Image (cartoon, grey):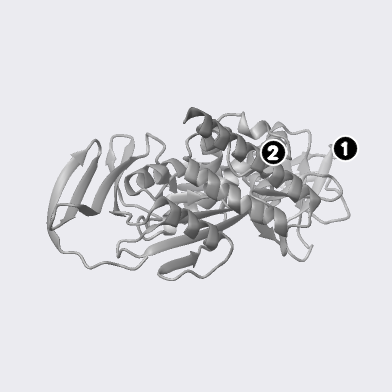
Amino acid sequence: MGSKELTIKGTEMVQLNDTKVFLRRTADGALMHAKCIVRLELAKKELYCVSKSYRPTVEGYIKLNSRVGLSVFNPPTIVIDGTDQGNPYGERDKKTGNILRWHAKAMIFGYNPLGIMQIMNSPICLDLRSYMIQDFLGKMKRFPVCAVYGSEDTPPEKIVYRNKSWDNKKHCYIYSETQEEDIKGRPMRKYCIDTDGQVWLWVDLSHPEIQAVFDTYVQRQKKGDVIAMSMAMRNGLAKHGAIATLTVDTKKEGDNAIAEVTVYAVKNVMSMSEINDVCKRAANGETIDDVSIVNVTADAKYEDVIDAEDTAKDEGDARNEKTEETKTEEYSDDERSVMNKDELVSIQTMILEKIKKTKDKKIKKALTNQLDKIEAEIKKIDDLQ
């Protein structure tokens, strides 16, 4: 994996659809480096806006990576509290069985602009309860009668509130006179919203906006595996040196916002077997010569979850309706169908190693099911050949 000294000649520019590509070649004409200026559009859901700042969506990062060619690798397991679990993993409440958190990890492999192989180790944790609390607070701002602050022990009997509206003449928010509404007898449920148990939020279970929050919570439990994996991939791509883009500058074209993002592609001089070997070793936590391994630390922000939810909706319901057993699988059937035999064999070897190491019967069963499907795909390829 050592580097080679190459003589680089001049730069040429070509236009590929909505992407400008600047190419650099060796003296004998071989392509080595490319700088791509990629157009992202709000109208195509490649950008989203948070606090007047634009960021690429999951779809935006997928488009950027299509110009760069970084490899996205999803390890079959993830370590939670010192124990190997399937990746992604849904952490459940022991009493209710509801999923409290989704854990996932993606690894991004590829060269940075300096030609150094860089691996972004990108874990993520989605705390579904905290997002539900944020949804409650958002509904409370828009519909003050649906929830109220109170003490832990005594359900509130009335809601005191003031409506807020925008004044176009004064260019500011104005508040109405104080109003009261009797809520005694309504089905109320309490949620603690601070760390020391002093602040409680009581929500009206009969209010349609609160019911909508619970519906969203159920959907996040069902689709959380797709959302978590999308966010883990997104964070890894955003931090990799070939893309390295968190926010973008935009220009307006009518109601549309346009961003031109610069990314860098470096020709891969490693063979497929070498790439598979690096993937396997890095996933097992090994230190590899001439490879920079970076641990990505990024919060699963509420607005990023909303973006990833849109991606999950676009992917359809087929994967989201899997049983809990199949949720531990690393790849969907569509993903396995586009892998070549070398990639499948590499994954097969890694799963076999994990099966040997794990003592957990449920994890071993899930890995064995995944192994059977990988071996079936390998057999299909062999039969075609």
Evaluate whether residue 111 shows in this view.
yes
* Residue 303 falls left or right of residue 3: right
Q: Quadrant of residue 199?
A: bottom right
Q: Could you tell me which residue is drawn at 13 percent across and 55 percent down?
A: 28
Q: Residues within 10 Å of mark 1 (few under 14, many from 20)?
A: few
Q: Nearer the viewer, residue 286 or 40?
A: 286
Give the residue at x 66% y 42%: 370
Vertical relation: 356 (above or below) 319: below
Q: Position of residue 247 (x, y in %)?
A: 38, 54
Q: Quadrant of residue 328?
A: top right
* N-terminal-most mark, 1 or 2: 1
Q: Name the kind of residue labelled 1 in the image.
A: Gly
Q: Is residue 161 left or right of residue 21?
A: right
Name the kind of residue labelled 2 in the image.
Thr
Mark 1, mark 2: which one is toward the viewer?
2
Q: SS at mark 2? A: helix
| Quarter of the figure that contains the N terminus | bottom left
Within the image, what quadrant is residue 115 found in? bottom left
Taking the spot 51% from the left edge, 43% from the top edge, the residue there is: 307
In percent of width and height, residue 361 lies at 80, 50
Q: Which residue is at the front of the view, 33 or 385? A: 385
Marks 1,2: beta carbons within 8 A: no
Seen from the viewer's position, the closer of residues 362 and 378 is 378
For residue 326, the mark is 2
Position of 113 relative to 62 (above/below): below
Label 1 belongs to which residue?
A: 185
Q: Is residue 104 visible?
A: no
Question: What SS does tag 1 mark?
Answer: loop
